[in-house]
Image (cartoon, rainbow, N blue to C red):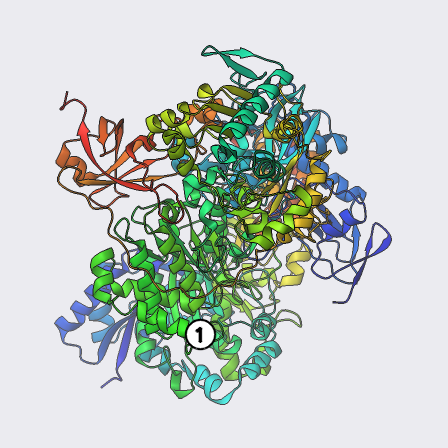
Amino acid sequence: MQPITITLNGREVVGEPGMTILELARREGVHIPTLCHGPHLTSVGDCPSISTCRICLVEDERTGAMVTACGTFIVPGMVINTHSPRVLERRRTLIELVLASHPDSCLICDKGNRCQLRQIAAELGIGLVRLQKIPQPVTIKDANPFIKRDLSKCILCAKCIRVCQDLVVEGAIDYFQRGFIAKPATFGDTALEESECTFCGTCVSVCPTGALTEAEPAYTGTAGTVVRSTCPFCGCGCSIRLEVHEGRIVRSAPNKQDPVSRGTLCVKGSFGFDFVHSPDRLTAPLIKVNGDFKEASWEEAVTAVTDGFRRLKEEYGSGSLAVFGSSKCTNEENYLLQRFARCVLGTNNIDNGSRLYGTAGLTGPGETGGVYGTTNSLAVLEEAEVILVIGADPTKSAPLVGYAVKRAVRCGNARLILIDPRESRLALFADLWLRPKVATDLTLVNGLCKAVIDESLINEGSVDRETAEFKAFVESLSGLTSTVVEETTGVPFVSVRQAARMYGSAKRAAILYGSGVAQQKNGTGTIEALFNLALLTGKIHGYSGIYALQQENNAQGACDMGVLPDFLPGYHPVADRASRRKFKDYWGDIPEEPGLTVFEMLAAAKSGEIKGMYVVGENPVATFPRAEFVREALSSLEFLVVQDMFLTETAKLADVVLPAASFAEKEGTFTSFDGRINWLRKALEPLGQSLPDCEIIARLAVQMGSPMAYSSPQEVREEIEKLIPMYRGIGYGLLEEPEYPTEYSGLAKTPPMYRKQPERAFSLLPARNGILWLEPDKEYPFILLTGSSLYDSGGGTRSSRAARLGRFSSGASVSINETDAGRLGVIDGEKVRIVSPAGEISAAAEITDALPEGLLYLPFSLSANPVSQLFDITLDPERKSPLVKAVKVRMERVGNSG
Amino acid sequence: MQNKRTVFVCQGTGCLSTGSGAVYEALKAEVAKLGLTDVEVDFTGCHGFCEQGGIVAVEPEGIFYTHVTIDDVPEIVGSHLKGGNPVERLFYRDPATGRAVPRYHEINFYKKQQRVILRNCGRINPEKIDQYISKGGYRALKKALLEMTPEQVIEEVKRSGLRGRGGAGFPTGRKWEFSRNAQADRKYVICNADEGDPGAFMDRSVLEADPHAVIEGLITAGYATGANAGYIYVRAEYPLAVKRIRIALEHARERGFLGRDILGSGFDFEVYIKEGAGAFVCGEETALIASIEGRRGMPRPRPPYPAQSGLQGKPTTINNVKTLASVPPIIEQGADWFSTIGTPKSKGTTVLALSGKILNSGLVEVPMGTPLSTIIFDIGGGIPGGKRLKAVQTGGPSGGCIPAKIPDTPVDYETLTMVGSIMGSGGMVVMDEDTCMVEVARYFLSFTQAESCGKCAPCRLGTRQMLEILARITQGKAQESDLDTLFTIAKTVKECSLCGLGQTCPNPVLSTLRYFKSEYEAHINKKRCPANQCRFLRRKTGKKT
């Protein structure tokens, strides 16, 4: 790689091969204006840039040619002028041409001073335009609350088109018409709501002018402060930029420096943060007196809490107390919370919210002690040649992962194997789509393992055929014939074999699974089988991997931090003396017995064994199945403390409610599903008297007489770094997130911070037999599947309080196959009742061809519809997670049955 | 007994529009009726002299009938074919002398031409591969595949000096070499037959009259560059061309010129047809590739050039129809022969579509470097009605206007660029003194403006602004400052646009500003159209007859 010397504005400068003129000029401090250029945006066909605005044209003195700085690689001996009179004249003419077809409405334009066109015009000293005004006539009929289009301001830089096509891969918009009247538009130029648009807002964030703006802006001016932070909704961990004006978040934009999110967000990340300013926020501690809440001072509240816990501990022992922590709180808060539970309250009865999604069970079966979960980084996923997606619709539950999968297929070299009975968005991208019957995943994956062995696709380096383990594994599959697989799953075995060949023969292959696997009865067995499949074919490490999606922003971190009844931080088994000793030096005594999971806690509360509970940032009454049972269990407690931002259904049952600060009002870190550590920065002061969870826990500890001597989250991080090997040696103990070095290209050259993979030795586990646990019958002839909704997050505590998300997601409907609907006489949009053995709900019916006969689908959007009421609390015996993925139901027309 | 004669009825698109399809059928019927066993009725593609259609030629005598209709059939058969007396009233008449010219090779229009690319056009039945072979067809392919290495083929083409006939004139051999040297598992060659210039029909004529010449060139290009697949990207508006290519491909496959192990050489090659949907810009190579890939036909910046990253990201060579048709003669007769034709820098011949104010309009093939005056006056027969030549516009709608004061301008790449025009696809519009040059610029720009894809700002916005200004000028509503603005925008569009369309579309404006500025000034300052053509400025008296 010989350095390249060129002459830039009369000065010799040196760059590297593969650098564009623009990159080198920027590094040398020479400013060249651009409009259509941006990080993460490339044109098709290996061009460094799309080069359509032509504003960055510079002059090559040797040839006399005008070339774009963004699209031209440096070559030795180039003589480039970036600001010669000719260049400036051309640039001015170009901007004047653009301005001649741009409205003169700058004074009232939302984009204001952030408009790049205006900035460049100012730089070039362009005032009134002498050209004839030729306006772009446009009519837009959008009615959504997120994105407003005013294409009379569009300069056709096509950034919106490119992010929609190449980054989020929705393809909702493309060029429409040609020549002067060309514009970005949806298919058929319809309103955005009628298109494929998911309102991810990425296009708004890249638009240089006021053509695309927020539909209902909180503030139209330029925000004074911009704070980089991390989105608190799903487990993807997208970095965001919060624009703050007068103590309010007025705008959220993706962080374009983030090499993983690549400057994308989803609708929640772009338009969902107004929950922070919801009038429902708690602003003071509440103490229940005679059944009514009374506002209290922190001193009173802390005293009430500690008195309550201390009394129970003294009277009934530590085992009568339990803590339910949050998969939404930061790592530091979670670390403190479990230490508080173990060393202050003295109990291992601690669990976190991801139990609901079956992923708290990253913990494997007892005999191996392995830790399941994501084995590789999201960035590597896109390098895969084959991606197998099972039990997940990442386009809804983890949009960033959805983007990555679609990009890998559309722009990379990946082929997609989709295993899903329902036609999710990914079906469009799938090379091979297997539609097994619901609840037969385990047999299908075992079938894949069988086919891998039969087809000799075993990776010899990864599996030794001579071991007892392997022989036992093969033996365990002996009863599984192709006929059995076919009959059980309904998938032709030729397709299973085809999938096995695709997956097994790829050099780099990824498996991606979500709660569709984890929330089912055979979930543990299926996860084991997926690991078996990867192990057999040598696809766990390197450029391959297994990706376990997480529904909550810090589900991974909460588990890493030991907010689990059976594991200390870093997955050290609590029952293991050596593990306990390691932490004892720092914390003091740790109880030996593993504690209860949250559903066990509730049962124990109901039966009176648990007397006091501390619930942090979770709302089980709303999110768990059988609300009445949960309510009763919590009501049976002698003492309940709930710490939350809102007076949730759960908080209403509490004796003391502690007001917590939102994500924007504190600092700390989240760990994404793939182990990326993302920093939160404080953008606002906590609302009213609310406090960051860290601070509240620390105050409680002091009052309990066991102070935890941390003066800041940084000190907590330093201890985490010392004690958890996964977080050691990666720079985790720093004051705050190290800046991504902004290289000349505007892209981070160093990868983001990843925590290390936990140490684990994978071995082949004998295949389990799938248990047939869900079969429709006469009374309940349908199976209802649940899934995620794009406009909701978890229990909806926050997303339902984001005004626009709430409005847009309301009216979630139950999907039904056309034939079934015809049989029942149900018409599209009709209100129907869904009845399961456990309960019933009503919803509007939506007729679809995405479902096979006999299957219904209702997204888990709790704010709109309490789907969870259709489920009983049936726990997976090992992971102790509820089976809330599918249930047998019947559908009744409301009109018919009165 | 006379030798066996063949009556060739032109079935090119031009002649077909005069009813030559019926003439062909009638001739067959008439010949059969009279039982003339020594006469075969066959058809050909375009002769290039479309103005004289329907054309019927009788070979080997070389009798050339013009303006033949179905009513003339009995006389041709009865008098000429049976009776031996050619029908004089159907002969071509020299417009200058009024003399009847019975034979093909005696006609001035043909006499001064040198036909390399159009060598078989009008001479063979394009739907019969044997006729192509009988004229030496596929000999070059055999030679290339069996006697030459790919490198030798490239060397031969390089030495011949052949340059791209699509307009830009890039040396074909070097283009092939780039692709040859690119490392990839797959490579492609594409024949660009997306002829979109209004009035241009040379590619269409070649494809309709001699499709095998193009296919032979394409296979040779594939062999030379290492590609095993080729595409012919042809406009859907050319259904006859598509049909004849399809037939030709089928025949070539039957004879083993296509498919696996061609002629036992071990070389595999397959050709696919892709019909374009009518966007002018798809003639631009990167837009063309996008279109083949099923994407919106829009250009992208180069580099990377298609030779590095083209179709499906693989090295791709794109050659014009006429370039490929030139290849077989070069291989067969050698680079030395080819390079004797033309000028030192522009070798070989060029095909021009001669039209406008000219007596003999049609397709003309001349050696590169032939002076404009030769083409206009000798071949074209001059300007009708005794009018004076004013300008010649070359290269299609993006070409410039060359004023009559430089009539000896040789037609080659460098000279045309120097005088402010381009070689382009070979369009040549002759203008007489009654032509308003401002209107000419406005007219051509209205085409390119409508065909701008809209991707890059200068072309999208600049062409529209220029068009507005030109309209103002022709309506007498312009101010003097508009001329400066027009010039500035034209320069900006030319220098700043992304693709060839934008980079060349200001040429009609810039060249007329250069050579005919006074006409612009007359429109603006005196509110007068010197040619008295602009409707809004037309004088009441002195009306054009």
Which amino acid does the dot numbered 1 rest on?
A: Asn
Of residues B371 and A406, the one nearer the viewer is A406
Q: Is residue A465 above or below residue B535?
A: below
What residue is disc 1 on? Answer: B228
Query: Is any part of residue A295 visible from this angle?
Result: yes
Q: Is residue B266 above or below residue A75?
A: below
Of residues A524 and A739, the one nearer the viewer is A524
Residue A489 is left or right of residue B210, and the answer is left
Query: Is any part of residue B400 visible from this angle?
Result: no
Q: Is residue B379 above or below residue A732?
A: below
Q: Name the residue at 64% across, 17% down.
A: A299
Residue B300 is left or right of residue A354, and the answer is right
Residue A20 is left or right of residue B357, and the answer is right
Q: Quadrant of residue A73?
A: bottom right
Q: Name the residue at 57% across, 84% down.
A: B152
Q: Chain of mark 1?
A: B
Quarter in which the C terminus of chain A is drawn: top left
Rendered location of residue A56, percent (x, y): 70, 44
